[in-house]
Image: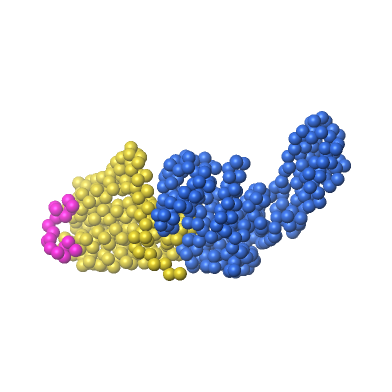
Chain colours: A blue, B yellow
């Protein structure tokens, strides 16, 4: 099958004016990536690594300086309008809703923009309202929505025309745990139901873990990693952290196999142990700890994305 | 896949957006009334300016007050109609900063049409009314030989004048891709152009005739059609029969505006200027 995204040697420079000199900044360089229909790809990297520039080239907002890009088999700049019918984009930082209109009014306008028939509009709006639980605020003007509500409305707005490819730029930024969870569940369901391809940029490892089966890491405009998430953790050796609350103070647990003791609080009442998820499991670590002390509570901390990215960057320099 | 869409379907997106803009402006009644009032005041002050001038002189550039009223009315009507429908285009930098422009890229309509139909300023209706009143008064008070060609000339003048001012706003929008903080620079052309349009071109020096007579064809929006309508000779380099060429001037204005817009969009996308 034809790839839904094909970038070949893609690059983009910007010219920045500094006093009188013009300085060239390479935002994206030599990016060669193919994405198959139905994939869910996490696109991660530090701020300014080139993520947004890539997305703008994929959607025809920016013209590449070098290389080629095809999105849904189309030339994004020359065939922008045809492409717009097949792609939905959620920008976490900018709104495609009308701030002074009720949510449902924005949906009505977008249905007109995408030339949905009355029946298709009703069916799709109904589906999205139900799955994203928007019934309570459909008649509320967008400017009065909470961030979580607005984000759900934004996602619905981008998906109203049932695009084959959905690009999400920081969709969960600033959301609380529950809102994040709801949004992720929706995206998983949407993908299962319609075979939608997802490409998302995020700073949240949870997004990548729960939504993506493939990860691209970009560093200073270049592709630094392309593969699955376990492979990424293996590459960078990202560790999880088991936090245990014990029923009484215990000396530092320095000898639990497969772990590294990070810190203790309250004379050893709470201890933090780092472990490599490839070498051992949380259950085994917990069993070892339980043999030494009574565990009252526990939490497992995921490696955060900044950490993973930092390690990849460090390994490349 | 060939998409055959009839006109109604093609217009549906623009109609939906514009209808929502109108509804939202009417829903804040008190605010809307205030906006109308302030817009009316601005129109009246512009008119008063001319009236005050004629308090101390009998004629300017060979025109009497009633004849000036005709020029002013025509220019003001065309300008305010353009301002009402496309005036928001020259706030392009705010569209860029808010990311609205990027959102336009994600919709299957041409960018410029989306920008033009993204808003409408109903409060400008007050200035349209001032312009219309001045125009009608000018038409009644002046000695105009009313026949079919005069009516055609008047209709052509209003349509072309509207098109020229609309083109000016679009051109200003195109320029602002380069001057994201330079709204003042384009305002100089937009408001300078409007001001020039309400003047008798007979008082202009030659450099100004070149700039506002032909390059930005402001003399074609009101002065020249009015001269043709009044059967007056016109001005140096600008005989009054040129009033009939207003549609040509409008076409020229749109060519310049669309090229500027295209140039601006290329710059924004970074595809070379």
**Where residue A111 sits in the image (x, y, percent)?**
43, 54
Depth check, front residue: B97 or B65 = B97
Q: Is residue A131 left or right of residue A121?
A: right
Depth check, front residue: A102 or B196 = A102
For the image shown, how many numbered marks are present on the structure?
A: 0
Q: Is residue B122 visible?
A: yes
**Residue B7 in the image: above or below residue A257:** below
Q: What span is colored magenta in the figure?
A: B136-152
Q: Quadrant of the C terminus of chain A?
A: bottom right
Q: Residue furthest right?
A: A255
Residue at image x 56%, y 53%? A190
Residue at image x 84%, y 33%? A250
Depth check, front residue: A42 or B141 = A42
**Where residue A169 sits in the image (x, y, percent)?**
57, 53
**Where residue B174 sits in the image (x, y, percent)?**
43, 60
**Where residue B165 sits in the image (x, y, percent)?**
32, 58
Q: Quadrant of the N terminus of chain A?
A: bottom right
Depth check, front residue: B100 or A115 = A115
Q: Is residue B134 left or right of residue B179?
A: left
Residue at image x 34%, y 58%? B166
Residue at image x 54%, y 68%? A73
Q: Is residue A241 left or right of residue A105?
A: right
Magenta stretch prevailing secondary structure = helix
Q: Residue furthest top?
A: A248
């Amino acid at each position: 099958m034809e790839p839904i995204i094909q970038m070949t040697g893609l690059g983009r420079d910007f010219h920045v004016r500094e006093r009188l000199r013009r300085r060239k900044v390479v935002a994206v360089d030599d990016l060669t990536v193919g994405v198959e229909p139905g994939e869910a790809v996490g696109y991660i990297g530090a701020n300014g690594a080139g993520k947004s520039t890539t997305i703008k080239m994929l959607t025809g907002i920016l013209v590449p300086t070098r290389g080629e890009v095809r999105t849904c088999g189309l030339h994004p700049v020359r065939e922008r309008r045809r492409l717009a019918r097949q792609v939905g984009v959620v920008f976490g930082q900018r709104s495609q809703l009308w701030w002074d209109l009720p949510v449902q009014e924005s949906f009505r306008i977008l249905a007109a923009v995408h030339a949905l028939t009355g029946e298709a509009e009703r069916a799709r709006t109904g589906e999205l309202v139900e799955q994203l639980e928007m019934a309570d605020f459909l008649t509320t003007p967008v400017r009065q929505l909470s961030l979580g509500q607005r984000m759900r409305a934004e996602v619905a707005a981008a998906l109203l025309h049932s695009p084959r490819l959905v690009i999400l730029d920081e969709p969960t930024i600033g959301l609380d745990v529950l809102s994040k969870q709801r949004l992720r569940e929706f995206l998983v369901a949407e993908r299962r139901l319609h075979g939608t391809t997802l490409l998302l940029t995020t700073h949240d490892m949870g997004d990548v873990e729960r939504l993506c089966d493939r990860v691209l890491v970009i560093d200073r405009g270049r592709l630094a990693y392309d593969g699955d998430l376990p492979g990424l953790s293996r590459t960078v050796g990202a560790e999880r952290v088991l936090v245990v609350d014990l029923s009484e103070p215990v000396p530092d647990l320095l000898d639990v196999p497969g772990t590294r003791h990070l810190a203790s609080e309250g004379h050893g009442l709470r201890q933090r142990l780092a472990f490599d998820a490839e070498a051992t499991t949380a259950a085994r670590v917990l069993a070892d700890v339980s043999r030494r002390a009574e565990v009252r509570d526990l939490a497992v901390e995921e490696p955060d994305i900044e950490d993973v990215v930092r390690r990849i960057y460090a390994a490349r320099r | 896949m060939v998409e055959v869409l009839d006109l109604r379907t093609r217009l549906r997106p623009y109609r939906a957006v514009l209808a929502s803009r109108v509804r939202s402006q009417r829903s804040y009644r008190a605010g809307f009334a205030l906006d109308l009032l302030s817009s009316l005041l601005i129109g009246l002050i512009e008119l008063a300016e001319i009236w005050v001038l004629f308090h101390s002189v009998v004629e300017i550039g060979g025109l009497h007050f009633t004849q000036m009223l005709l020029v002013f009315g025509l220019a003001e009507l065309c300008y305010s109609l353009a301002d009402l429908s496309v005036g928001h285009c020259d706030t392009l930098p705010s569209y860029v900063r808010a990311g609205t422009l990027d959102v336009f890229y994600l919709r299957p309509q041409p960018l410029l049409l989306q920008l033009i139909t993204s808003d409408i300023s109903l409060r400008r209706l007050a200035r349209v009314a001032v312009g219309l009143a001045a125009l009608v008064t000018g038409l009644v008070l002046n000695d105009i030989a009313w026949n079919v060609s005069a009516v055609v000339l008047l209709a052509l003048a209003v349509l072309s004048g509207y098109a020229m001012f609309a083109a000016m706003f679009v051109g200003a929008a195109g320029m602002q891709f380069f001057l994201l903080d330079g709204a003042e620079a384009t305002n100089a052309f937009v408001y300078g152009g409007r001001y020039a349009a309400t003047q008798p071109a007979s008082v202009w020096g030659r450099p100004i005739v070149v700039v506002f007579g032909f390059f930005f064809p402001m003399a074609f929006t009101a002065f020249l059609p009015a001269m043709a309508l009044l059967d007056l000779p016109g001005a140096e380099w600008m005989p009054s029969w040129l009033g009939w060429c207003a549609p040509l001037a409008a076409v020229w204005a749109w060519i310049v505006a669309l090229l500027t817009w295209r140039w601006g969009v290329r710059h924004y996308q970074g595809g070379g200027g």
